Every structure is written in structure tokens, then in C-alpha cells.
Amino acid sequence: MRRLIRQTLLLSFAALVLTGCDALSSEPTYRGINVSGMNYTPFNLSRFTIHDKYGNRAGGGGDLMPGAGEGRLSCCYKLKGTEFTVDWEVYDGEEAFKDIYAPIKVIHKTTQVHFPKSNISGGPGSVVLAAHFYPDDHVEFELLKGFGGSRIDYSEVNHWLKTNFGKAVTGDDSRGTVFRRTARIASQGWLKYRLTDSVDLQQYVYFTLLINPTFDEHPSVQRILQETKGQPGAFGAAMQKLPESVVAEIKSNRFDRVASGT
């Protein structure tokens, strides 16, 4: 009997060593997870590495264009805890395009991420840790099942603009330049007003690009921004209903007359 007890204790101790004492830790542990980066910055996301406080690492990236990432995964990683450090690199695609033979000027960033304990069912390889990279350089984590999960779609905004306004939007610029310009303006819509809905961003880019880059200073637009705050799609819908007279005032930059009521 004593021999059996001793063997049981030895096996239990060995199990604890092999699991790195995870069984005794209150910290969440995520094993066999896929990692996907969602890039909402106006730059290309070349790479990122997630570090926990226990020496584990997970990585991804791979030259993600603005708005890209939901279809690209890297596997399979273990991460532990609730506090993480993300080291990531971006570069300006428009600057890189100007001279394809010049060294790419990479910008290095480091962001701290707090990710509360999250539960999601599924075996190894079936769970995706999505890292959402925002224009203000903060990063958010999210556990997902399978592909998808993008929160901002710059390509949809760009497609709408080109379809509806053609040369007025594209001019003689390349497709890449047009897209990067759209992403840059749309990212400002997020920075200033936290716009994420495609219809909201379509109107924001349209008015910035084709009407007046300071359109949001007009009292009527300011009122719409206040009334639709936190309601995805509402800003875009309201801007589409602006009277033609107001749009003309915005286009002619006659804000002083409107503000003074004269």
C-alpha cells in the first residue's frame, strides 16, 4: 500500500512539473491557439509578437494592408495570464511605393495589453486569438471561433467610393494609392469620432475627400455627430439626408455665415 501511495505522489509531482505548475495557478492558460492580426492603422503591419510574463510568445503579421488580417492565421501557441506585451512593426506603404529599391523605413511600437480571463470552447487549433491594432496604437485581444472578426473594413469603403464616384476619387492614381488614401482618411474618422461602421466611414471619407476636409466643423454636422454618437450606421444615414443647401454651404466653406445666423 505504501509503495502504491509513493508511486501516486511521484506521478502527481511529475505531472505538475510537465505542466509548468499551471494546475496550481489561478492565471488563465490558452493552449494550441491560432493568432490573427487585424490591422486598422493606415500603415502596413509587417509583424507582431505577443509576450506573456512566463516566457511564452506568439506571433503573426506578414505585411498586412490597412484593414486586412482576418483570413491569415499563425499556429499554434500557448499564452498565459492577463497581462501581455505586444511588439509590432509598421511601415508607410505610400512612402515605400515611391522608391521600391530604397530600404523600407520600419516603425517599431510596443503596447501593453490587459486581457481578462476569457473562456471559449474548442480543442487545440480551433480557437483564434485576434489582436486588433487601432490607429491610436492601442491593441485589443479577442477570442474567436474560426476566421473573421474584423471590426473595420476599409476595402468596403474604398469599393463604394470608386463605384459611386469613379475618377473624382481615383484621378490618375494607382489602385494602391487610392486605397491607402481612403484608409488614411477613414482611420481619422475612427480617431476623431470612433466610427467603425462602413456606411459611417463612407460618408466621412466622401465629405472629407470630395466636399470639404473640414466638413465636420459645420454646426449641422456637429449636431449629427452628437446625436448619433455610439449608434453604428446612424451618422452615415443622417449625412445622406443633409439638405442640398447645407451641403452647398459646407462645400463653399461658409461656416461663419451659418454659425452667426446671418
Image (cartoon, rainbow, N blue to C red):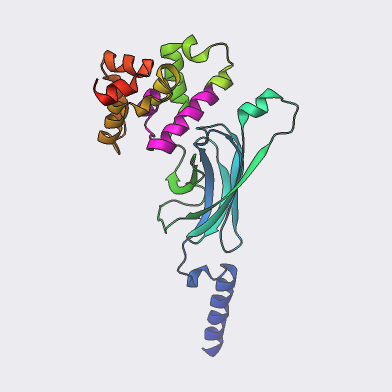
**Which residue lies most toward the bottom here?**
2
Nearer to the camera, 167 or 71: 167
Give percent across and percent down for residue 17: 59, 72
Q: Is residue 171 above or below residue 24?
A: above
Query: What type of secondary structure mainly makes up the magenta span?
Result: helix
Task: Give me the residue at 43% from left, 13% from top.
Answer: 163
Residue 201 visible within the image: yes
Q: How many marks?
A: 0
Q: Is residue 256 left or right of residue 149?
A: left
Nearer to the camera, 250 or 39: 250
Q: Is residue 91 left or right of residue 168?
A: right
Task: Give me the residue at 54% from left, 81% from top.
Answer: 9
Give percent across and percent down for residue 40: 49, 36
The quarter of the image holding the C terminus is top left
Q: Is residue 148 above or below residue 262?
A: below
Q: Which residues are magenta?
A: 179-203
Residue 7 on the magenta segment: no
Give percent across and percent down for residue 227: 25, 34
Residue 62 falls in image quadrant: top right
Q: Is residue 89 left or right of residue 249?
A: right
Residue 151 visible within the image: no
Q: Is residue 236 left or right of residue 120?
A: left
Task: Give me the residue at 45% from left, 29% from top.
Answer: 186
